[in-house]
Image: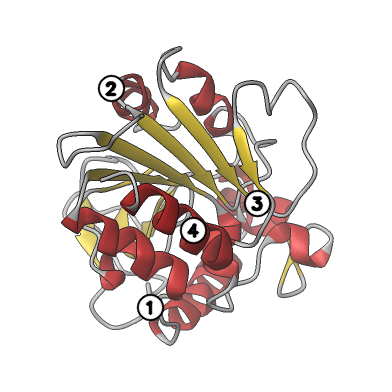
Amino acid sequence: MFTLTKQKKIVVFTGAGMSAESGLKTFRDTNGLWEEYRMEDVATPQAWERNKELVLRFYNERLKQVINTKPNKGHLILADLQKHFDVQIITQNVDDLHERAGSKKVLHLHGEIRKMRSSVDEELIYSIKKQEIKLGELCEKGSQLRPHIVWFGEMVPEMENAINLITQADIVITVGTSLLVYPAAGLIHYATLNAIKYLVDPGTFDDAVLQNVKHIKKVASLGLEELQKAMLSMV
């Protein structure tokens, strides 16, 4: 019988469906729109060059939504699993709901909404203190501060670290993602042949995605609750 121990390394890869139950909308919820904004107008380097004021307004609105949102049951379940296993979270989400739920190891692939960074030096990263980034607010090198977000068309600097974590996992749990947005969608393929793989999502996936993957066809909180019970029974 397969048993789990605290030393077993679990890597959880979470997408937009993880935070959707907390009330945070995704592009797919609104046919490619975020609160009436087109992705091309607010989430690309070109959009930033065209209209910094619009981009800042969009992300300041998103930031205020996140601040007023609470972790859901799924976030809390993942945090609770730390009592029993070595749990590492890799998330596509830019909110801090995993951290607020109590998860200690969280790698953000696409940046963090509660941080801002220099437009000329991506190493200069600051916490947002007043719930917004203002036009004219500059980094120490004199450039306009921008959201600490990986926009469409930009490199994903944490990808190598994420791949390294996936290759070390005994168990990989993918939650709330369509597995359509690359390069992040390809992470699951870096798991070793011996790793146990779960997919928690109510969507329909093709056979190639589900090969050697146990699919729990439920929303994040319900699927993780089912998986938590199964995993704790093996401890």
**In the image shown, does 210 or 98 lie closer to the viewer?**
210
Residue 69 as seen in the image, left or right of residue 16: left
Q: Mark 2 or mark 4, which has the lower sequence index?
A: 2
State the residue at coordinates (80%, 67%): 30
Query: What is the spatial separation of the Cα atoms under label 2 and label 4, in whole angstroms?
Result: 21 Å
Q: Mark 2 or mark 1, which has the lower sequence index?
A: 1
Q: Quadrant of residue 79?
A: bottom left
**In the image shown, does 182 or 135 lie closer to the viewer?**
182
Query: What is the spatial separation of the Cα atoms under label 4 and label 3, in whole angstroms?
Result: 10 Å
Residue ID for mark 2: 168
Check residue 224 in the rendering and tell me which mark sits there, or answer none: 4
Query: What is the spatial separation of the Cα atoms under label 3 and label 1, in whole angstroms?
Result: 33 Å
Instruction: State the SS at label 4.
Output: helix
Tag 2: amino acid: Gln
Query: What is the spatial separation of the Cα atoms under label 2 and label 1, in whole angstroms?
Result: 38 Å
Check residue 230 in the rendering and tell me which mark sits there, or answer none: none
Query: What is the spatial separation of the Cα atoms under label 2 and label 3, in whole angstroms?
Result: 23 Å
Query: What is the spatial separation of the Cα atoms under label 4 and label 1, in whole angstroms?
Result: 33 Å
Residues marked 2 and 3 touching at CB (< 8 Å): no
State the residue at coordinates (20%, 49%): 141
Q: Mark 4 or mark 1, which has the lower sequence index?
A: 1
Give the number of the mark in front: 2 or 4: 4
Residue ID for mark 3: 201
Check residue 132 in the rendering and tell me which mark sits there, or answer none: 1
Give the number of the mark in front: 2 or 1: 2
Quadrant location of the N terminus? top left
**In the image shown, does 219 or 13 lie closer to the viewer?**
219
